[in-house]
Image (cartoon, rainbow, N blue to C red):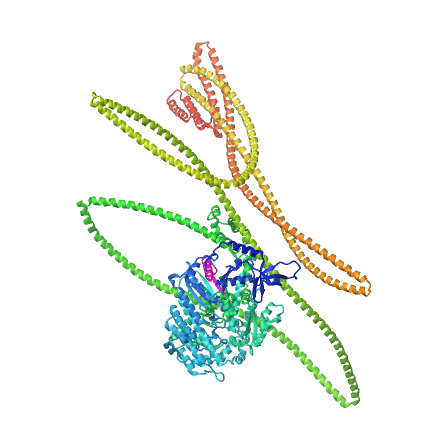
């Protein structure tokens, strides 16, 4: 077996074979023995009858005409061993069985069936269950693993870890199909893979558990060599880490009566045979097994064959070892063997058949009593005594105390053998419960558990006829079949009902066939309760109820029997119910006590024998006394075990065992089951033996329903394979291929139909099996869309989960048909969620790898930092060691090192003593705390157990109270109803009594009259004769009337009988027609279902093709992106090549320059060599000259050495240059080779990409044309804007020129006035100097001069400031214009984009409308085509009818021709012949018309198909254009958003500029107002200056009298000065007011330097102090000082105001 799916490349032969397969239409022919492969033969229309097809069988080539319903489409050979049946191309019964048979022949017994698993039980023990195979499945997803029972366990375990939700695995199937074996494999896998803390749950321990369960709960049957005779649930509790924390086993429906009574040819439980064969001598002696009985009332006899004995002995040894593994002590084992031996001896003792109820053989009974630890009298009284009292109590439960004697009479017929059987079954039931308790004791744990996994194993379907047994099924087999039916109902509910309800809740429309109802009809026939189930009444009501309720009622009814029970059952569910579908599920048997019940939707009919079933419903006190007997045993090991178990609630109502456990999940399971037994009807009926069966199954289903269920369907390969001896399945041969030929196809088909696997596969394929809540899906898969996470942020709060999930799905690029958005969750097709999970795993692995890399980098940096610190520490230690070595010999250091430890010794000893005392105190405290903690823990455990017991008791009491109140209410209503009925009956009784009294009075009167008449006859004979005549006449009239009425009645009766016969004939005809129509309807329904299934398969295939196309498109987009990346890489390579070429040119230039340098150096070397030669020649000459002295010679040698050194240096430089040149040449050669290689590769790439570049160039040229058009439009708009800008600039310049011209004129005028003022002031200065010389007012004149200079300075500064402000105003105007222009341009662009957006939206709406219209047309065309097809089919039918009529007419025509010849011979008139000929011609013309009509309709169909194809193409084009327009719309929206942001920024700038403009306008207005005030002040100053000039001239002219001048000079000058001072004062006051107004406006400030103002202010203070010191001019000094102080204050206040002192 291989894990995963290895994809193999198909060969050409395989591809050719597949093409040939698709070319020939292969089908399966269904027949009685199975199915056969055939090929459909194409025939001409009309050559075969309707509903018939021609096929050719593959194995022998036979050609057959078969019905269409007997043919199913076949899949290609590649699907023969498909791992998942849901992946088949055509899903039908034959294809599914063929795949299963092929896999079974290859020893592949496991197959996926959608979410479920199908397992066919192998005939041999396969080697696919090993620890190595377990580890192959560990951690795998279901999609990545091959089908295996381990895959189911791994899937459940994975879901448990991811969802933290309880899981359960339910095994379904027939008896002998391998459910228990698969259950063992599941448990072993989970325990091995999940593990446990401390390895307390090992595979060995679980093997021991199943060894014990197989010994005590299994027995050989006709269906199975080791069949489970009980149902059990294995509960594995897991902790937070996913390990097994605790485990437990709950058992129910034990077939305990098998100990004493069982069907023929079947055995009791295995443990008896194991014990009898494997007990050693000491145990045999203790159990009294040395001499076994020859016969037994229970049929427990030792095995006869030696092989069976040896096998049983080995199993007993294995059983003892298993008990030892589970911690069951020797004494406990001995107690078990004692009870089993006692049961055996009770069977050997037997019971009397007649007479007093007692043991038949007392010596064996004495052995049983000894083994049980009691006396023979106690054992006998527990079994045979007090029967009437117990039975009376059981019957009076419903009948009440008044009818107890009747119950006694009916129940006192219990025989002694039945009492003995009840005691044996009770003992074994208690023993089995004890074994389960001991197993749970070994499995329980006190660890905290989070969630649990349940594995449900029940006995399979039992059918004796399947094992060729001619007997009826027993009541125990009915119970097991009922359990399987309930589990099948749960499968139907989970697979169909819940899925369809979920689709309905989420508004998902899904076209599915009508799902058949579940097995609830056959279940209802067993357990349906009546509405009066709580009422204690013995009345047999007409309300329908199930078999279990009828058994309980008949058991307590006086004279109740199985016959009446079956009659009532048939009256409720039999064939008398006419229209009820359940009538076909219950049939009468051939014998009185037999009945047939159809299980598994009527595919498995089981015949039951109801003989003796009522004994199961009757309470036998012997079974109840068994527990008391064991608890009161004299043997301590027995009584100790059962007394300890009696204190705990391990058994629920004597039904469910194994409810021990202290974990939270175990308590929750126990509470759930207890609630099932104490709520509603269960509270009243839980003591009933029959109703306990239903309650146990209810508890099981309720426990499973709370979890997520995984179903495993176990199939039986063939019926005759089940009944072998020895080990199961091994003796039938080891060859797996032999099972392929002997596979029972009919049995396999019945099991498939009964389990409804095909319907489950269809709803799995067509529906959306995987679903997740929006928030959960978004949280789990947002890792696949990191751009959305970056966009919203990790802590982004989602307001609309559905919209967020929609965005996530769009970003994942899933196929639209692969998911569906519901109201609260998203649904996925099969396999989509697994692909997303795989993508998530890949992304998670990538993220974790990046995280690990970051962590490793951080750790490496930390380690490096640590190493640096260690290096520093080492260096510090080295330094200290060096220092220590330096001072080591110093005497003072030696003294210090010697004395220092001695000082600290005392201190350390005291510290140690103190620490020891603290340690002792802490130890004492710790011991005390530990002791208190242990006591508290024990108290808490005891209190918790007490709390759990009290809570369970409280829940029981509460539920009992609820049921009692419900019972009281029902009894009250029943009492009221009975009172009302009694009143009605009393009233009727009174009325009837009155009528009876009146009738008695009439009878008395009639008797008196008769007596008087008789007396009158005797008295008078005459009158008597007259009365006699009248009497005789009346008698004759009465007889005549009788005859007449009899005649009329006979006539009417005959008429009515005739009418009845006619009606019966009509009814029979109508019934025949109805049956025919029903058959036709069934055939049409089957045909419709088959066609619908084929259509759905085709749709799924189409969806698969679409998803494949979608994947191909994604791959194409990925290829395009890679291609663009490759093109970019080519571009980069081209750039690099150009760069390398430039570097090559540079290097060649450098090499050329180096070569030139080398040539220059060569020339220099040559010159040096020549010079050297000359020097040598000169040296020779010098040597030849003897007159040269040694000094010159040394000098020459020195020069020679210098020259040689220079030459060597030159040579070295030359060598270096040569080496550089060589290296450059090598680099050049290497670069040239690299360039050549790159040129070759890139030339190839460029040649391959030329076509693509050409296409891109064409598209770019188109885009360039569009861009050019847009640029031209933008250029025109820009020209218009520039033109407007030039016009505005010209206007602005003209306005500025006007303003500047006006300002220049005013400035000139002011300058002239200033000059004139200066002249006047100069004259005034001269006069004032003259006055100053004669008067003490020099300081005031100097102050006025300074004031004048300051005013001139401020005027010049104001002019400069004005010019700067004008420049700023111009700049602001320009900015304003630019801003307004950009704003206009942006507004135009925004409006243009808005228009484009509106156009696009309108275009999209039009396209959407066109698309809707096209869809409507498409739908209409499809509907029309469907109608046309229907018409064509009708016309074909009409054509066939016409052909039939034509044949008939031809036959008639031949007959008529023969008649015509005969008539012509017999000279008959020819008018009849002409009439027949005319009719023939009319029929032929009609036939021709029908043919033309058919041809016309065929052409119409072809035309409609073409239109349909065109419409689909148009729809695809529309959808693509719509997608493009959506993208364009998104792009435009982004542009509009950017433009809006720019517009907002421009609007902010514009508002800022407008605010500045407004401030400047306010400043200009304030300046104009200041200018006007200054001009007014200037005019006033001119006037005052004119007055001053006139005064001066008058003074100059008046020189008459010198004395007068001298005498009046002082006064005149004083007055004149005062006048001038007053004028200046008034002018200054006006200027002061103007400056105050300007300062109040606060628009502008003076631009005079602050230093100058500060100087003036300080100067005025000094002058004021000097004026205060002077005595003569005190008034004037104070006046002028105040004036100066105020003017300078105004200057300080009016800072940066240019026009303040312009005048």
Q: Nearer the viewer, residue 1074 or 566?
A: 1074
User: For residue 1154, what is the image quadrant?
Assistant: top left
Q: Residue at x 35, y 46 (%)?
A: 861
Q: Residue at x 78, y 88 (%)?
A: 1024
Confirm whether residue 118 shows in the render: no
- Residue, far left: 891
User: In this figure, what is the number of numbered marks?
Assistant: 0
Q: Is residue 329 left or right of residue 405?
A: left
Name the image quarter holding residue 1290: top right
Location of residue 1516 with respect to 460 vertically, above or below: above
Q: Is residue 1005 visible?
A: yes
Question: Does the stretch in magenta take in 162?
Answer: yes
Residue closer to the observer: 1632 or 302: 302
Q: Is residue 376 above or below residue 153?
A: below
Q: Residue 692: x percent and y percent?
A: 50, 71
| Residue under the point 76% across and 58% down | 1481
Residue stretch rendered in magenta on the structure: 146-173
On screen, residue 510 above or below 1375: below
Q: Is residue 333 rendered magenta in the image?
A: no
């Amino acid at each position: 077996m291989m894990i995963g799916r290895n994809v193999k490349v198909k060969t050409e032969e395989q591809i050719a074979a597949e093409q040939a397969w698709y070319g020939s239409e292969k089908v399966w022919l269904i027949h009685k023995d199975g199915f056969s492969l055939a090929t459909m033969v194409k025939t001409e229309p009309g050559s075969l009858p309707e509903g018939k097809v021609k096929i050719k069988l593959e194995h022998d080539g036979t050609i057959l005409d078969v019905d269409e319903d007997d043919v199913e489409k076949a899949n290609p050979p590649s699907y023969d061993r498909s791992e998942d049946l849901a992946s088949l191309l055509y899903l039908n019964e034959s294809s599914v069985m063929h795949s299963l048979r092929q896999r079974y022949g290859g020893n592949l017994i496991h197959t996926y069936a959608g979410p479920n698993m199908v397992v066919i039980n192998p005939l041999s023990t396969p080697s696919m269950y090993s620890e190595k195979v377990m580890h192959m499945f560990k951690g795998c997803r279901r999609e990545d693993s091959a089908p295996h029972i381990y895959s189911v366990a791994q899937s459940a375990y994975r879901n448990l870890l991811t969802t933290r939700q309880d899981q359960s695995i339910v095994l379904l199937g027939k008896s002998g199909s391998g459910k228990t074996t698969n259950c063992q494999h599941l448990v072993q896998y989970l325990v091995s893979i999940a593990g446990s803390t401390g390895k307390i749950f090992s595979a060995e321990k679980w093997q021991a558990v199943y060894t014990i369960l197989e010994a005590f709960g299994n027995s050989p049957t006709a269906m199975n060599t080791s069949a489970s005779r009980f149902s059990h649930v294995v509960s594995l509790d897991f902790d937070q880490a996913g390990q097994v924390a605790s485990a437990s086993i709950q058992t129910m429906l034990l077939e305990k009566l098998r100990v004493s009574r069982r069907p023929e040819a079947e055995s009791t439980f295995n443990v008896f045979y194991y014990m009898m064969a494997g007990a050693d001598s000491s145990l045999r002696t203790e159990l009294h097994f040395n001499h076994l009985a020859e016969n037994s009332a229970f049929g427990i006899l030792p095995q006869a064959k030696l092989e069976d004995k040896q096998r049983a002995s080995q199993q007993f040894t294995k059983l003892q070892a298993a008990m030892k593994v589970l911690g069951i002590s020797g004494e406990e084992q001995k107690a078990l063997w004692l009870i089993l031996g006692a049961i055996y001896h009770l069977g050997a003792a037997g019971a009397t058949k007649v007479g007093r109820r007692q043991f038949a053989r007392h010596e064996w009974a004495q052995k049983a009593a000894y083994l049980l630890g009691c006396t023979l009298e106690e054992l006998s009284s527990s079994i045979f005594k007090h029967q009437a009292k117990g039975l009376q109590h059981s019957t009076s439960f419903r009948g009440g105390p008044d009818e107890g004697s009747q119950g006694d009479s009916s129940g006192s017929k219990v025989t002694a053998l039945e009492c003995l059987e009840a005691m044996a079954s009770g003992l074994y039931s208690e023993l089995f419960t004890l074994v389960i308790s001991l197993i749970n004791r070994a499995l329980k744990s006190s660890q905290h558990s989070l969630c649990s996994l349940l594995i449900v194993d029940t006995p399979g379907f039992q059918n004796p006829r399947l094992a060729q047994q001619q007997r009826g099924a027993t009541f125990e087999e009915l119970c097991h079949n009922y359990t399987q039916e309930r589990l099948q109902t749960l499968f139907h509910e989970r697979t169909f009902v819940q899925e369809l309800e979920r689709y309905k809740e989420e508004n998902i429309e899904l076209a599915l066939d009508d799902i058949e109802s579940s097995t609830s009809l056959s279940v209802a026939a067993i357990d349906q309760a009546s509405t009066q189930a709580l009422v204690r009444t013995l009345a047999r009501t007409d309300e329908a109820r199930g078999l279990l309720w009828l058994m309980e009622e008949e058991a307590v009814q006086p004279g109740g029997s199985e016959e009446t029970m079956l009659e009532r059952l048939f009256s409720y569910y039999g064939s008398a119910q006419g229209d009820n579908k359940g009538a076909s599920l219950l049939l009468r048997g051939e014998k009185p006590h037999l009945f047939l019940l159809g299980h598994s939707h009527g595919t498995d009919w089981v015949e039951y024998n109801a003989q003796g079933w009522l004994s199961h419903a009757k309470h036998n006190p012997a079974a109840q006394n068994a527990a008391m007997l064991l608890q009161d045993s004299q043997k301590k090991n027995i009584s100790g075990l059962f007394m300890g178990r009696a204190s705990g609630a391990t058994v629920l109502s004597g039904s469910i065992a194994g409810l021990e456990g202290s974990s939270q999940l175990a308590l929750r399971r126990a509470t759930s089951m207890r609630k099932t037994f104490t709520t509603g009807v269960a509270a009243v009926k839980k003591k009933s033996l029959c109703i306990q069966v239903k309650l146990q199954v209810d508890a099981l289903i309720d426990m499973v329903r709370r979890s997520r269920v995984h179903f495993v369907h176990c199939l039986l390969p063939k019926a005759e394979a089940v009944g072998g001896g020895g080990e199961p399945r091994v003796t039938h041969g080891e060859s797996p291929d032999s099972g392929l030929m002997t596979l029972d196809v009919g049995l396999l088909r019945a099991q498939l139909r009964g389990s409804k696997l095909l319907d489950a596969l269809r709803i799995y394929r067509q529906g959306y099996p995987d679903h997740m809540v929006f928030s959960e899906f978004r949280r789990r898969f947002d890792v696949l869309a990191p751009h959305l996470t970056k966009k919203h942020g990790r802590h982004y709060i989602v307001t609309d989960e559905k919209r967020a999930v929609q965005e996530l799905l769009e970003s994942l690029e899933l196929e639209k048909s692969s998911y569906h958005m519901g109201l609260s969750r998203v649904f996925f097709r099969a396999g989509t969620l697994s692909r997303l999970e795989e993508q998530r795993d890949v992304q998670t692995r990538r993220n974790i790898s990046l995280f690990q890399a970051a962590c490793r980098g951080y750790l490496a940096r930390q380690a490096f930092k640590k190493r640096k610190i260690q290096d520093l520490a080492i260096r510090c230690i080295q330094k200290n060691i060096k220092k220590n070595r330096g001072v080591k010999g110093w005497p003072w250091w030696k003294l210090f090192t010697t004395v220092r430890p001695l000082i600290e010794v005392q201190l350390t000893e005291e510290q140690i003593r103190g620490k020891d005392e603290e340690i002792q105190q802490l130890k004492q405290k710790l011991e005390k705390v530990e002791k208190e903690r242990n006591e508290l823990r024990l108290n808490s455990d005891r209190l918790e157990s007490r709390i759990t017991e009290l809570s369970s008791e409280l829940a029981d009491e509460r539920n009992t109270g609820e049921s009692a109140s419900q019972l009281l209410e029902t009894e009250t209503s029943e009492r009221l109803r009975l009172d009302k009925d009694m009143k009605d009956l009393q009233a009727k009784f009174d009325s009837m009594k009155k009528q009876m009294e009146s009738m008695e009075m009439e009878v008395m009167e009639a008797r008196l009259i008769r007596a008087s008449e008789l007396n009158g006859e005797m008295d008078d004979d005459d009158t008597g004769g007259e009365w006699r005549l009248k009497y005789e006449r009346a008698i004759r009239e009465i007889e005549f009337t009788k005859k007449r009425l009899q005649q009329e009645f006979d006539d009417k009766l005959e008429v009515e009988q005739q009418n009845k016969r006619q009606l019966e004939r009509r009814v029979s005809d109508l019934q025949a027609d109805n049956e025919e129509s029903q058959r036709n309807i069934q055939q049409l329904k089957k045909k419709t279902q088959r066609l619908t299934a084929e259509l759905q398969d085709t749709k799924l295939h189409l969806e698969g093709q679409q998803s494949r196309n979608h994947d191909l498109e994604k791959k194409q987009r990925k290829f395009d992106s890679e291609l663009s990346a490759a093109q970019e890489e080519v571009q980069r390579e081209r750039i690099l090549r150009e760069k390398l070429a430039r570097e090559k040119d540079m290097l060649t230039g450098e090499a050329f320059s180096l070569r030139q340098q080398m040539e220059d150096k060569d020339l220099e070397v040559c010159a040096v060599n020549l010079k050297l030669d000359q020097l040598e020649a000169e040296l020779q000459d010098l040597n030849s000259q003897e007159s040269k002295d040694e000094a010159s010679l040394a000098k020459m040698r020195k020069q020679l050495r210098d020259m040689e050194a220079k030459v060597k240096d030159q040579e070295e430089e030359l060598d270096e240059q040569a080496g550089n040149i060589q290296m450059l040449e090598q680099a050049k050669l290497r670069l040239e080779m690299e360039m050549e290689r790159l040129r070759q590769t890139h030339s190839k790439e460029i040649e391959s990409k030329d076509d693509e570049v050409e296409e891109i160039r064409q598209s770019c040229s188109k885009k360039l044309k569009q861009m050019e058009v847009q640029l031209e439009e933008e250029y025109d708009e820009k020209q218009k804007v520039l033109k407007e800008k030039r016009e505005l600039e010209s206007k602005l310049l003209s306005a500025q020129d006007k303003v500047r011209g006006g300002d220049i004129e005013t400035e000139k005028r002011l300058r002239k006035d200033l000059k004139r003022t200066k002249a006047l002031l100069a004259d005034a200065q001269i006069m004032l100097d003259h006055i100053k010389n004669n008067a003490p007012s020099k300081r005031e004149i100097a102050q006025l001069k300074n004031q004048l200079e300051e005013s001139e300075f401020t005027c010049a500064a104001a002019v400069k400031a004005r010019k700067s402000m004008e420049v700023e105003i111009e700049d602001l105007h320009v900015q304003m214009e630019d801003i307004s222009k950009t704003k206009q341009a942006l507004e135009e662009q925004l409006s243009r984009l808005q228009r484009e957006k509106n156009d696009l939206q309108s275009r999209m709406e039009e396209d959407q409308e066109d698309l809707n219209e096209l869809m409507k047309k498409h739908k209409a065309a499809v509907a029309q085509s469907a109608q046309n097809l229907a018409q064509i089919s009708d016309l074909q039918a009409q054509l066939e009818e016409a052909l039939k009529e034509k044949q008939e007419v031809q036959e008639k025509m031949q007959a008529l021709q023969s008649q015509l010849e005969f008539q012509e011979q017999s000279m008959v008139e020819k008018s009849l012949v002409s009439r027949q000929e005319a009719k023939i011609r009319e029929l032929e013309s009609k036939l021709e018309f029908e043919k033309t009509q058919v041809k016309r309709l065929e052409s119409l169909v072809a035309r409609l198909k073409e239109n349909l194809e065109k419409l689909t193409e148009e729809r695809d084009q529309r959808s693509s254009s719509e997608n493009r327009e959506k993208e364009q719309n998104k792009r435009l929206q982004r542009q509009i958003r950017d433009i809006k942001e720019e517009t907002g920024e421009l609007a902010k700038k514009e508002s800022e500029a407008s605010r500045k403009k407004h401030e400047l306008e306010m400043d200009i207005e304030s300046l104009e107002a200041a200018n006007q005030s200054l001009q007014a002040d200037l005019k006033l100053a001119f006037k005052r200056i004119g007055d001053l000039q006139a005064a001066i001239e008058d003074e100059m002219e008046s020189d008459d009298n010198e004395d007068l001048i001298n005498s009046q000079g002082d006064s005149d000058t004083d007055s004149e000065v005062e006048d001038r001072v007053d004028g200046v004062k008034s002018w200054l006051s006006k200027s002061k007011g103007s400056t105050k107004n300007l300062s109040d406006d606060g628009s502008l400030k003076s631009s005079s330097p602050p230093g100058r103002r500060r100087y003036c202010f300080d100067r005025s203070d000094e002058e004021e102090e000097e004026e205060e010191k002077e005595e003569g001019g005190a008034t004037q000094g104070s006046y002028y000082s105040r004036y100066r102080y105020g003017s300078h204050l105004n200057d300080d206040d009016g800072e940066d105001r240019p026009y303040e002192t312009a005048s």
